[in-house]
Image (cartoon, rainbow, N blue to C red):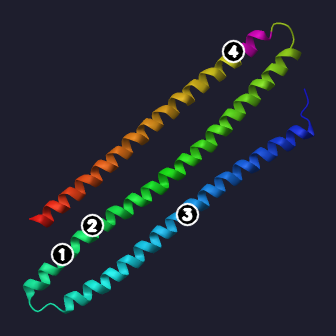
Amino acid sequence: MYVTPEQIQAAGKANVETLLAVANTQFAAFEKLANIQAGAVKSAFEDSIANTRALLGAKDVQEFVSLQSAFAQPAIEKAIAYSKSVYEVTTEANAEFSKVAERRVAEWNENFVTLLDKVSKNAPAGSDVAVAAVKSMLAAANSAYDNLTRVTKQATEIAEANVAAATETVKGLAKAKKAA
């Protein structure tokens, strides 16, 4: 069996499309992360200027200490919001990468099975057992890959739930401390 120029061209095109999809996902994630980072730096700078002015206007040590304590709550909330935003961007990018990988694995499996079928038609007598063994190994590998994908998705969902719970806990503690 020979590989035709059309097959080589199709494979090259598929590889380039995959590369471009991954690059677009990476650039989109980098852009979002840069915007989040720029916003955080700008906010921190503005807050530090406002906090410094407030501290310089303090009339006594007690007011100075109470102002410092008051600055902690907004800082914690902003840190939580920043972390949550970064986590959301990375989770979204990871989901896109997973989709691209799943598509490529499915295409590879389909092409490999097609190749096996073509080879088995032209194979000498008695090679059916070897072809069946390869197909069985491929099915087992696909099953293992599907299981790994399912477990990874479950772990991601658990991690997201834990992040949400931790965020709510920290917010609750901060509110309780503020009320006290």
Q: Are the residues tagged 4 and 3 within 8 Å (C-beta)?
A: no
Q: Position of residue 34 (x, y in %)?
A: 51, 69
* Neighbours of disc 2 within 10 Å: few (<14), some (14-19), many (20+): some
Provide the secondary structure element on which disc 1 rests: helix
Give the mark toward the camera: 1 or 3: 1
Q: CA distance from mark 1 to mark 3?
A: 34 Å
SS assignment for the magenta stretch, majority: helix
Q: CA distance from mark 1 to mark 4?
A: 69 Å
Residue type at mark 3 is Phe
Q: CA distance from mark 2 to mark 4?
A: 58 Å
Residue type at mark 4 is Ala
Q: Which residue is mark 4?
A: 133
Residue type at mark 2 is Ile
Magenta stretch bounds: 127-133
Picture residue at 37% right of the left edge, 44% below the top:
159
Residue situated in front as seen by the camera: 86 or 142: 86
**Quadrant placement of the C terminus:** bottom left
Provide the secondary structure element on which disc 4 rests: helix
Provide the secondary structure element on which disc 2 rests: helix
Position of 87 relative to 73 (above/below): above
Residue situated in front as seen by the camera: 168 or 155: 168
Q: Which residue is mark 1?
A: 70
Q: Is residue 67 in the magenta section?
A: no
Compare marks 1 and 4 and give the one earlier in the sequence. Answer: 1
Position of 121 relative to 106 (above/below): above
Q: Which residue is mark 3?
A: 30
Q: CA distance from mark 3 to mark 2?
A: 24 Å
Q: Which residue is mark 2?
A: 76
* Neighbours of disc 3 within 10 Å: few (<14), some (14-19), many (20+): some
